[in-house]
Structure formats: C-alpha cells, structure tokens
Amino acid sequence: MSYQKQLQSGTWQERRLRIMERDKFKCVKCGKKDYLEIHHIDYWDEHKAWEYPDDMLLTLCRPCHSEEKNRPKHEMHLLTAFNYAGFTAFDLLHLSVLLHSDKGFVQDLKAKLRGNN
C-alpha cells in the first residue's frame, strides 16, 4: 500500500484524530490551531503510517511541518535515538526550551557530557 493510500485510510484517520486530541488541536511548536497535520519524527521502512509510537507523532501546522520535513537526515536519526532511549518528543521540546533559556543548565550539561563533573 502506498504512503498516500495509507494516509487516506480509516485506520490512519482515526490515529491522526487521537494524536490531534492529545495535542489539544494545536501545533505543538507554535500553538496555531489551523491547517494542522501530523508529523512523523522519523520514518521506518517497515512501519505503516499508523504503526508508530505516539511519541513519534506530533501535531504541527502546515508551515511548521514544512520546516520539520526539511530537517537534515542526521537530525531525524538523532531524534529517533532519543526515542529509543526513552525520551519523548515532549521531553525534547522541554530540553530545547531549557537550552535556549537557562545558561546554567547549558553549562552544567556541557560539563557532564565532557566528564567534568
């Protein structure tokens, strides 16, 4: 079954609705409530569109979804690695906020990663 056919299936439409309900029918990146789409953080050849774990699916508005689709492949793989380690997309969103806003957190994290506790 082609990917386009998968996205038209009732199974995907139900799953899509559940993810949008979880995300309160708004883009998790910018908060907009129109032109919503579901983003797969990464794609696995052996999975159908609806077979991904919930934390690999995000509600995004069309502009934010376009930005995510243009993400370099190595970044998508990094996100998948975080997922396998037990982090959710929301954990990573929270982490990104901390990285942008808390200089002390960033310094502590860099020190830990370099082994300079």
Image (cartoon, rainbow, N blue to C red):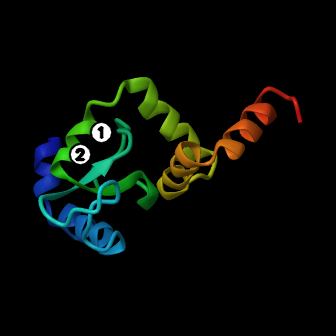
The dot on residue 31 is none
The dot on residue 68 is 1
Name the residue type under label 1: Glu
Q: Name the residue under label 2.
A: 65
Given contact means CB atoms under 8 Å apart, are the residues at marks 2 and 1 in contact?
A: yes
Where does residue 33 sit, x and y in percent of width and height? Answer: 19, 67
Q: In which quarter of the image is residue 18?
A: bottom left
Q: In which quarter of the image is residue 51?
A: bottom left
Residue positioned 25% across, 37% down in the render: 67
Horizontal side, residue 109 vs residue 68: left or right: right
Mark 1 surroundings within 10 Å by alpha-carbon count, few (fewer than 14), some (14 through 19), many (20 or more): some
Where does residue 104 sit, x and y in percent of width and height? Answer: 71, 44
Q: Is residue 51 visible?
A: no
Q: Can residue 59 be seen in this view?
A: yes
Horizontal side, residue 20 vs residue 110: left or right: left
The answer to whether 24 is drawn above or below residue 28 in the figure is below
